[in-house]
Image: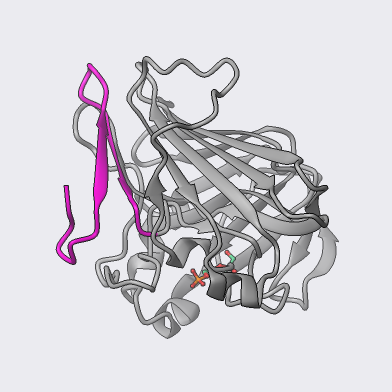
Amino acid sequence: SKDRNGIEQVILRNNRGASARVSLHGGQVLSWKTERGEELLFTSSKAIFNPPKAVRGGIPICFPQFGNRGSLEQHGFARNRMWTIDKNPPPLPNESNAKPHIDLLLKPSEDDLKIWPHSFEFRLRVSLAAEGYLSIISRVRNVNSKPFSFSFAYHTYLSISDISEVRVEGLETLDYLDNLYQKERFTEQGDALTFESEVDRVYLDSCNTVAVLDHERKRTFVIRKDGLPDVVVWNPWEKKAKAVGDLGDEEYKQMLCVDGAAVEKPITLKPGEEWTGRLELSVVPST
Ligand code: TA6
């Protein structure tokens, strides 16, 4: 199907009615719904669905650079490019092709190679399991003759009821780089993370499971990851939300970014080598 700007999108639906929508622009998941049709990802009411800008919401892919840690545009160019449907993807070990899935491919254009001179093949698989969880697998292969390094994040906008009623578990005691304090390193004080003001952190060397508890909606997002050592946590809060043009002034209350990422230690690939980064999102009822 096509969106209002004629951008191709793919709808995945499992046999219980859960669904996901993926745009070929940016390879961006724009929607993930429960079998009851409840939207689980946040999209700003002021989102701009006009390439090359990435839609504010869903799960933008930050590649080959996370944030402003380098010479490229913020979060790299992958989220601002048209991807193609990968008709003949190399098989994914222990991934069943039975579940609804889409395979997308991004290769650098001549212009991309001018700003980032590293030939790569980025294969993205988005799939929806029978139980409704969303799985995203990124495979980046170095098809160049020299090694290259990149940083990466699945910039995941979770839809929540009220940011002041949310707790994040699984990051206790970790060190983090605080983007609000010149990316300096701090240590988390050992309890679940709650939110009273802007948070913009990269938690380091996290374990592979993080839980985001939405108290009001009595549900917990479970984020499982592999190949992604770090977790970015971002909420702009009131002042920053007003400064973000494609985010409603009050909407910071309904969103939280908890991103599987590889930021502190960029991934280095030798010629011919391939990296795999897996993210699995599920939502479970919680008391
Ligand atoms: O989540 C980390 C971060 O770099 C924040 O500092 C904020 O800029 C956010 O990403 C959104 O970035 P974007 O380029 O999508 O507006």
**247 to 284, vertically: above or below:** below
**35 to 207, vertically: above or below:** above
Q: From the image, give the main secondary structure of the stretch colored magenta.
A: loop
Q: Indicate the colouring scheme.
A: one colour
- The C terminus lies in which quarter of the figure? top left
Is residue 241 toward the left or the right of residue 24 in the image? right
Question: Where is residue 188 shown, x and y percent of the image?
Answer: 78, 52
**Residue 132 falls in image quadrant:** top left
- What count of labels does the image hold? 0
Q: Nearer the viewer, residue 83 or 74?
A: 83
Q: Nearer the viewer, residue 103 or 135?
A: 103
**Residue 17 falls in image quadrant:** top left
Residue 2 painted magenta: yes
Question: Where is residue 107 shown, x and y percent of the image?
Answer: 53, 55
Q: Nearer the viewer, residue 89 or 207?
A: 89
**144 to 70, vertically: above or below:** above
- Asked whether residue 265 is in view, the answer is no
Which region is colored magenta? 1-25
| Residue occupying image coordinates x 82% and y 57% | 146
Question: Where is residue 204 shown, x and y percent of the image?
Answer: 78, 50
Is residue 181 toward the left or the right of residue 247 in the image? right
- Asked whether residue 158 is in view, the answer is yes
**272 to 246, vertically: above or below:** above
Residue 172 painted magenta: no
| Residue occupying image coordinates x 40% and y 82% | 242
Is residue 265 toward the left or the right of residue 80 in the image? right
Is residue 266 toward the left or the right of residue 166 in the image? right
Q: Among all residues in the image, which is located at the extreme bottom?
A: 243
| Residue occupying image coordinates x 60% and y 19% | 93
Question: Where is residue 100 shown, x and y percent of the image?
Answer: 32, 24
- Quarter for ligand 1? bottom right
